[in-house]
Image: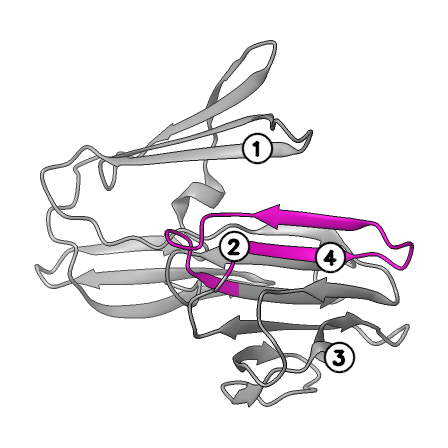
Amino acid sequence: TEIIKNFGIAEVKLLSSVGSENTYELIYSDGTIMEYPDHGEVARVPFSYEATENSLTLHFSSARFGYEYTKTFRESAEGGLQVDYRIENRSDYDLDVLWAAHCLVNAEQGGQVLVPFGEGEDVDIMFDTVPRFTPGARIPFREEYFSTKWTEGVPECRKFYFPRQAPEGYLAYRYPSGDVLMMEFDPDRISCIGVWENFARFNGAYCIGFEPASVGYDTV
């Protein structure tokens, strides 16, 4: 597959939507047209892998865009799971990209999402299926928004994004038991924070999506 040589997107069109999976058409300024999946190609392709006694490394080489994508899992010094990423542009052209994690955490009634922002911080409502909030609105953040409570038999999901750069690099979930699951990252490189609440709306799961990102909003 030929590597595309012009990355200036002129137009993006939604081609199809099946369930929660969207496919887009990217129309470049040189006339090139390409189909592209929601959440990017990395989320939809098989990886090669190399396993050692202490680590697992996954690798993908993009024929369309000419980059190499590698991530390695190992136990951290503190006993947690450390994930290291390396994304290298091997083409002769600049490549504008967005990187975002999509870590799903099991939610329980009465749990609490913890973020490095205080009450009153601006937060954007990307979507809301109920809706409890107005999609597209920018509202003052309240900690109660991230208290995981839902009504049985009423599927719902919504996504929040904080427009300001994260002052600290973490997202966490505190269970009713008091146990805390925490994701830490470098806020100078991963500067935006998104949170997805899903209560039986997607695949019948009850979960929180931790979505730290290199830039805002995780759509094409």
Which numbered dot is residue 173?
4
**Residue for badge 3:** 144
Q: Earlier in the sequence, mark 1 or mark 3?
A: 1
Q: Quadrant of the N terminus?
A: top left
Residue 149 part of the magenta segment: no
The structure residue drawn at horizontal position 45% and vertical position 48%, both measured from the top left corner, is: 186
Q: Look at the numbered discs 4 and 3 and tell me whether their residues touch, using CB distance below 8 Å.
A: no
- The residue stretch that appears in magenta: 168-193
Q: Earlier in the sequence, mark 3 or mark 2?
A: 3
**Residue for badge 1:** 82
Which numbered dot is residue 169?
2
Crowd band around label 4 with a 10 angstrom C-alpha radius: few (<14), some (14–19), many (20+): many
The structure residue drawn at horizontal position 75% and vertical position 79%, both measured from the top left corner, is: 144
* Left or right, residue 32 beside residue 72: left
Q: Earlier in the sequence, mark 2 or mark 1?
A: 1
Q: Give the percent coordinates (x, y) of residue 48.
A: 45, 21
Q: Circle 4 — which element? A: strand
Whole-angstrom CA distance, mark 3 to mark 2, is 21 Å
Q: Look at the numbered discs 2 and 4 and tell me whether their residues touch, using CB distance below 8 Å.
A: no
Q: Earlier in the sequence, mark 4 or mark 3?
A: 3
Crowd band around label 3 with a 10 angstrom C-alpha radius: few (<14), some (14–19), many (20+): few
The kind of residue tagged 3 is Glu
Whole-angstrom CA distance, mark 2 to mark 1, is 14 Å
